[in-house]
Image (cartoon, rainbow, N blue to C red):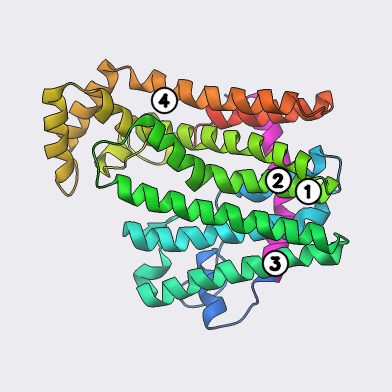
Amino acid sequence: MVTTADREVAALVQRFLPAVKSRLREAVPNAPGLHGLLRYHLGWEDQHGEPAEEDGGKALRPVLCLAACEMAGGDWRRALPAAAALELIHNFSLVHDDIQDGDVLRRGRPTLWSFRGVPQAVTAGNAMRVVADDTLLALSRVGLPADAVIEAAMELTARYLEMIEGQYLDMAFEQSDDVTTDNYLDMVGRKTGALIEGAMFLGALVATRDASLAHAFGVCGRRLGLAFQVRDDYLGIWGDPAATGKAVGADIRRKKKSLPAVYLFQHADESERAWLRATYADDEVTADNVDRVLAILDRLQAKAYVQQVAERQAAAAVGMAAGLGLTPAVRRTIEAMAKFFVTRQK
């Protein structure tokens, strides 16, 4: 069933995404060698350097950046350098995450490292980050004064360093059975929430040049990012396979330490926890054991708990937006985004 929130968010994507894609193509030259690796990861070329059908993912961060600019009263087109930079930073993180996680597929294609090797993929990821920094500085060419451009660059750097800290914590948590739900939410607040915070900060900054207002938009964005990630965790276990393209319990089979798994280890009884430790020590959780994990999660009412956490974060974002003096139309847009983030099916 398509909801009003679905339609409103789809309308934002339809308005903003073509301009983001165009700006990204300006940022990454149509050239062989290193830039070819970036173009492959972004879905623009195949493994032979030939044009490919693009699948760039959700483009959540640039869309939120442009939406925040417009909601703060600005011309969203002026924020395009920031929006493109955010998407490039996100993709820099994906290139390196694929290496660290050993993932051989992304969006149905071989990951960059899996066919070009780890050294070249690391180099390409590093280059993507530098291209992002350079792209952001183009804000100076759309009339933003130098002090505001510096403020924007400092914000982006701070948020992607925080994102990297989140990735560090995520990897550390994989080796621990003692992670609490609070630990987990702090980690995803960094890994996912920080860059979404940066997206809304940058959009509002371009619109107003008011760092205080931009910060308030950013805090709202971080809550939206948490809601988005927690719903992602929900879908990774209980999502409809027809919508997600993954089997029920897919994240259990992969032993992913998402919020349901953290809640499971924290609240299972001693005998269950001993069994879980042994099960998660194997290379992969078997189908029978996935079913048993699902049964324990059901007994613990984990499904309802995870959804409630997502909804609390979304409600907090809406509450923060209510104090920004925004127009009723803008508040409704933020409410729609928050609703979409916690009800989406994929």
The residue beneath circle 3 is 135
Question: Is any atom of residue 123 visible in this view?
Answer: yes
Picture residue at 31% right of the left edge, 49% below the top? 172
Q: Nearer the viewer, residue 269 or 64?
A: 269
Amino acid type, label 1: Leu
Q: Is residue 15 magenta?
A: yes
Q: Nearer the viewer, residue 90 or 287?
A: 90
Mark 4 lies on a secondary structure that is: helix
In the displayed structure, 94 sits above or below 304; it is below
Q: Residue 117: which quarter of the image?
A: bottom left
User: Quick one: label 4, few (<14), some, or many (20+) residues within 10 Å?
Assistant: some
Q: Nearer the viewer, residue 117 or 158?
A: 158
Question: Is any atom of residue 54 visible in this view?
Answer: no
Q: Earlier in the sequence, mark 4 or mark 3?
A: 3
Measured as percent of width and height from the top left, residue 153 is found at 69, 60
The residue beneath circle 4 is 306
In the displayed structure, 229 sits above or below 294; it is below
From the viewer's perspective, is the residue at label 3 or at label 1 nearer? 1
Q: Residue 253: which quarter of the image?
A: top left
The residue beneath circle 1 is 205
Q: Earlier in the sequence, mark 2 or mark 4?
A: 2
**Cβ atoms at labels 2 and 1 below 8 Å apart:** yes
Measured as percent of width and height from the top left, residue 58 is found at 57, 47
Q: Which residues are magenta?
A: 2-26
Amino acid type, label 3: Thr
Q: CA distance from mark 4 to mark 1?
A: 33 Å
Q: Earlier in the sequence, mark 3 or mark 1?
A: 3
**Cβ atoms at labels 3 and 1 below 8 Å apart:** no
Amino acid type, label 4: Val
Q: Earlier in the sequence, mark 4 or mark 1?
A: 1
The quarter in which the N terminus is drawn is: top right
